[in-house]
């Protein structure tokens, strides 16, 4: 990704927009380190993709709760320099004997192991991957590239109910008050 690329992030209010997680040693998300040595920052190229990755996490759940939206904010970050990302599509997957089905499912053991391999055996700043919700482009940035991002003027902006309704509908979900 070239310098100047803008990334979107929807994050918990308690976290800085540039928060590398998870908080503890146990992996939680798709490309987290199974050994707890490095941390990741998850980003999306589009706000809609970030919404899907953050608030539409379970496809069988039909609602996006207003309380979940209220606990989060949106921020934009910009690449300070070119980001060297390991592509997990086409040849990047095939080189590991995998398909999109292997990395888009709920079995995170595969993606955790793949992330650990990429971190240990390449100089990549992170992983470029496809969202399982709308085919948008995402990045899992390794903490070794923490200095590669700049904050923009869009930091910690509350998601309005109107925006949440619109975004939820794009994923076939309803925005509801609990």
Image (spheres, rainbow, N blue to C red):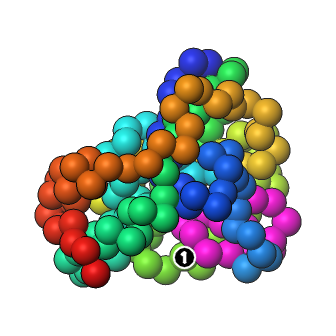
Residue located 38% across and 38% down the image:
46
Determine whether, in the image, residue 149 is placed left or right of residue 133: right
Find residue 164 and report its horizontal and vertical position in percent: 27, 54
Find residue 76 and report its horizontal and vertical position in percent: 52, 35
Find residue 159 and report its horizontal and vertical position in percent: 38, 50
Q: Secondary structure at mark 1?
A: helix
Find residue 107 and report its horizontal and vertical position in percent: 49, 80
Residue located 68% across and 45% down the image:
18
Against 123, residue 1 (above or below) is above
Nearest the eye: 17 or 105? 17
Quadrant in the picture for the N terminus: top right
For label 1, the residue is 108
**Residue 117 part of the magenta segment:** no
Residue located 69% across and 21% down the image:
81
Quadrant in the picture for the C terminus: bottom left
Against 106, residue 121 (above or below) is above
Q: Quadrant of residue 30?
A: bottom right
**Is residue 114 visible in this depiction of the protein?**
no
**Residue 39 part of the magenta segment:** yes
User: Which stretch is magenta?
Assistant: 27-40
């Amino acid at each position: 990704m070239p310098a100047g690329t803008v990334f979107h992030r929807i994050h918990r209010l308690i976290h800085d927009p540039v928060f590398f997680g998870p908080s503890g040693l146990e992996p939680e998300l798709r490309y987290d380190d199974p050994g707890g040595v490095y941390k990741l920052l998850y980003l999306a190229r589009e706000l809609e993709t970030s919404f899907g990755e953050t608030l539409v996490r379970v496809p069988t759940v039909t609602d996006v709760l207003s309380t979940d939206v209220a606990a989060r904010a949106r921020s934009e970050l910009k690449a300070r320099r070119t980001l060297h990302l390991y592509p997990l599509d086409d040849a990047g997957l095939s080189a590991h004997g995998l398909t999109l089905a292997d990395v888009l499912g709920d079995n995170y053991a595969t993606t955790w192991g793949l992330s650990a391999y990429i971190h240990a055996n390449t100089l990549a700043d992170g992983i470029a991957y496809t969202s399982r919700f709308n085919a948008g482009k995402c990045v899992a940035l390794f903490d070794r590239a923490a200095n590669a991002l700049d904050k923009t003027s869009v930091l910690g902006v509350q998601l309005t109910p109107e925006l949440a309704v619109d975004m939820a509908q794009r994923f076939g979900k309803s925005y509801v008050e609990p």
